[in-house]
Image (spheres, rainbow, N blue to C red):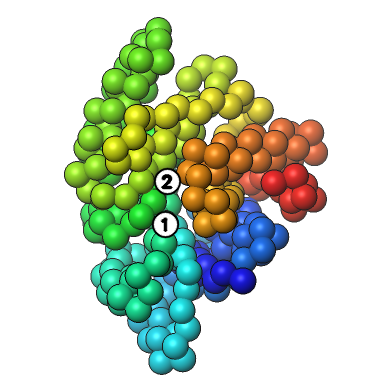
Amino acid sequence: MKHIAAINDLSGVGRCSISVILPVLSYMGYCVNPVPTAILSNHTAFPYAYSVSLTESLKPYLDAWDKNGFQQDAILIGYLGSPEQADVLYQFLTHAREKNPELIIILDPVMGDHGRLYRNITSRYIDSMRKLIRLADLCCPNLTEAAFLSDLDYQGITYALTQCTSEEGRKMVLNAMFSGLSCLTEGKIVVTGIDCGELYQNAVWQPDAELQILYNSKSGAGRPGTGDLFASIMTGDYLETGDLVNSVKRAADFVALSVKHSEEEALAPVFGVQFEDILSRI
Ligand code: PXL
């Protein structure tokens, strides 16, 4: 059984981060080893949140893993408790890769959505993600995160995409962003949740391959935690098959299904996506 370290926060209410990654990747047949970066009463889209950042304990936590000789097949990184955590993680990832050259590092640079940064996310935090992305074999920012990472204007890209009348045009706009992102990483890049009217697009960029765009029809309003759900399924499938385009398709299809299911169950969007009772449909 493959081991995946999930470096992310634990939010008590709202279905995101470790509370999504752990059940999904366990269901997919992996042993998930969580590394909590922060503990929150609930995610930050609720009006109030109590949050404890675990910056002080991150290094001793990971040192103990090292002393015990624990080895991972993959490491999935998401929300950090502070920008300083990126320095500790950079060392940990570098060392983990030396010990296991086959290690796959996936970064979901959780920072914002719909053109806005989440509460507590600063320009230092964005820089810390720019640092970690260098080590990633695969990263999956949403359009907002991709724009902040590549220092492009989100509204400008969104406007340009809506003005395109052909896929070729959309690819030209997206390629401008991917060329910025590819200066930050040599890994593969998936930009998720690109809103284009009736459809969502996911764009898959792989070195030496043509940009691929996958389409999903919109099944309901955006919800917190969908990025974590997407990243988990993409990671699980990619580790199993190595076929990134198909992994993205599988992840996007299940996110769309979970959003639809949540609407049918009349779950308020802030509580995230209800996926627990439909896991068998991944
Ligand atoms: O799923 C994104 C996410 C992760 N972690 C925390 C969040 C959010 C989005 O709101 O607040 C703490």
Name which residue lies at 58% across and 27% down: 216
Q: Is residue 152 above or below residue 83?
A: above
In the displayed structure image, the side of residue 60 where residue 217 appears, left or right = right
Name which residue lies at 22% across and 37% down: 180
Q: In the current view of this chain or complex, which residue is farthest to the bottom? A: 67
Q: Position of residue 270 (x, y in %)?
A: 62, 44
Q: Which mark is residue 206?
A: none
- Label 1 neighbourhood size at 10 Å, few (<14), some (14-19), many (20+)? many
Q: Amino acid at mark 1?
A: Ile
Q: CA distance from mark 1 to mark 2?
A: 8 Å
In the displayed structure image, the side of residue 249 where residue 54 appears, left or right = left
Name which residue lies at 55% across and 44% down: 247
Could you say whether the residue bearing mark 1 is in a helix, strand or loop?
strand
Q: In the image shown, does 55 or 277 lie closer to the viewer?
A: 277
Q: Are marks 1 and 2 in contact (CB under 8 Å)?
A: yes
Could you say whether the residue bearing mark 2 is in a helix, strand or loop?
loop
| Mark positioned earlier in the residue sequence (1 or 2) | 1
- Label 2 neighbourhood size at 10 Å, few (<14), some (14-19), many (20+)? many
Name which residue lies at 47% across and 83% down: 70
Residue 156: in sight, yes or no? yes
Location of residue 194 by image quarter = top left
Q: Which residue is mark 1?
A: 106
Q: Position of residue 120 (x, y in %)?
A: 37, 55
Q: Which residue is mark 2?
A: 140
Q: Quadrant of the N terminus?
A: bottom right
Location of residue 88 by image quarter = bottom left
Q: In the image shown, does 43 or 23 lie closer to the viewer?
A: 23
Q: In the current view of this chain or complex, which residue is farthest to the left? A: 183
